[in-house]
Amino acid sequence: MIYPSIDKLLTIVDSKYTLVYVASKRAHEINEKHFLQMKEEEYTSKKAIGRALEEISEGLIKIEKK
């Protein structure tokens, strides 16, 4: 099973396209700056994209609608 689920993420983000864009941007930031918003042992995923999705799921990333 994939964590976090796409259904939960889509209740936070308005579209799949926005989700992909925000998660991708955050994953690049994690890889470049090595800054995590949670303790490393709190993440389920080992990869940056999974960690970005977990941060979105936990509400640590605010998505502004334009």
Image (cartoon, rainbow, N blue to C red):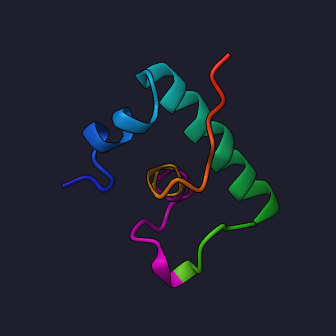
Q: Position of residue 59 (x, y in %)?
A: 52, 53
Quadrant of residue 10 within the rendered picture: top left
Specify whether residue 45 is painted magenta: yes
Q: Is residue 46 above or below residue 29?
A: below
Is 30 positioned to the left or the right of 2 in the image? right
Q: Nearer the viewer, residue 65 or 21?
A: 65
Screen quadrant of the C terminus? top right
Q: Nearer the viewer, residue 19 or 62?
A: 62
Q: Is residue 41 above or below residue 55?
A: below
Which residue corresponds to the image point at 55% horizontal and 52% vertical from the top-left?
52
Which residue corresponds to the image point at 56% horizontal and 40% vertical from the top-left?
23
Q: Position of residue 46 (x, y in %)?
A: 47, 68
Which residue corresponds to the image point at 51% horizontal and 49% vertical from the top-left?
56
Q: Which residues are magenta?
A: 41-52
Q: Position of residue 37 (x, y in %)?
A: 65, 67
Q: Is residue 8 above or below residue 34?
A: above
